[in-house]
Image (cartoon, grey):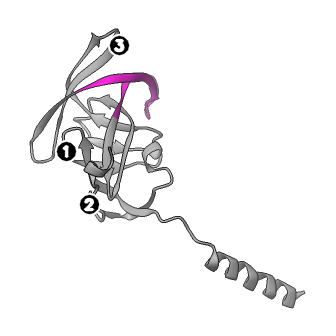
Amino acid sequence: MRMLSGRLLLLCVAIAVTVPVTAREVVGWAEVAVIHPGNLSIRAKIDTGAKTSSLNCKCHDIYEKDGEQWLRFSVDSHDGTRLWLERKIHRFARIKRHFGGVQERPVIMLGICLGGVYRETEVNVIDRSGLDFPLLIGRQFLHENFLVDSAAQYINPPHCDINSVK
């Protein structure tokens, strides 16, 4: 029986070593990301507990354009650079707050570069000025592309080639 168990274990190890693993980028729990349009560098917290990403926005204004709702807002980088953006509202999300209750937030599509991965993703916008990170990156963006090292931070600076994306 032991010999059979040993051989089975060796077979499992051999299979595990020979099966290719999809390459994933490693990021720390905190990174610098770049948002597009605008090419703005911003500090981001990587949050595997959040489904969608969330961005601090100031001075937001919802208006109608061609029969659709749009959002005008500004985002500040860590060096004080302010970027004004206008994005079509993709939907409204009902977010469960950690202290209870539900908050409705506009959701836009926004390009994010994290490490070497550029992806357009859903981002809800809200005043996060009381928090340490203006951008929270959730599982929808991280899915299939990243492994998170919870002991590390700022280990994978943004290096996307945005010109080759579109």
- For numbered disc 3, what is the local secondary structure? strand
Q: Residue at x 44, y 50 (%)?
A: 142
The residue depicted at 40 percent of the width and 24 percent of the height is: 90
Please state, as top left, top right, bottom left or bottom right, where the C terminus lies in the image. Answer: top left
| Badge nearest the viewer, 2 or 1 | 1
Q: Check disc 1 and report the residue beneath it.
A: 39
Query: Which marked residue is nearer to the observer: mark 3 or mark 2?
Result: 3
Residue 67's tag is none
Within the image, what quadrant is residue 151 found in? Answer: bottom left
Q: Secondary structure at mark 1?
A: loop
Q: Residue 98 at what x, y percent from top left?
A: 44, 35
Mark 3 nearby-residue class (10 Å; few <14, some 14–19, many ≥20): few
Disc 2, SS: loop
Residue tagged by mark 3? 68
Q: Is residue 152 left or right of residue 8?
A: left
The answer to whether residue 132 is visible is no
Name the residue type under label 2: Pro
Q: Amino acid at mark 3?
A: Glu
Q: Position of residue 149 (x, y in %)?
A: 41, 64
Alpha carbons under labels 3 and 2: distance apart: 36 Å
The quarter of the picture where the N terminus appears is: bottom right
Name the main secondary structure of what is drawn in magenta. Answer: strand
Could you tell me residue 67's position as x and y percent? 34, 8
| Residue 16 showing in the rendered view | yes
> Which residue is the site of mark 2?
157
Amino acid under label 1? Asn
User: Residue sitting at 26 percent across and 57 percent down?
Assistant: 158
Q: Which residues are magenta?
A: 86-109
Q: Look at the picture and state if 87 lies above or below 62.
A: below
**41 or 131: nearer the eye?**
41
Is 14 displayed left or right of 154 in the figure?
right
Residue 95 belongs to magenta span = yes
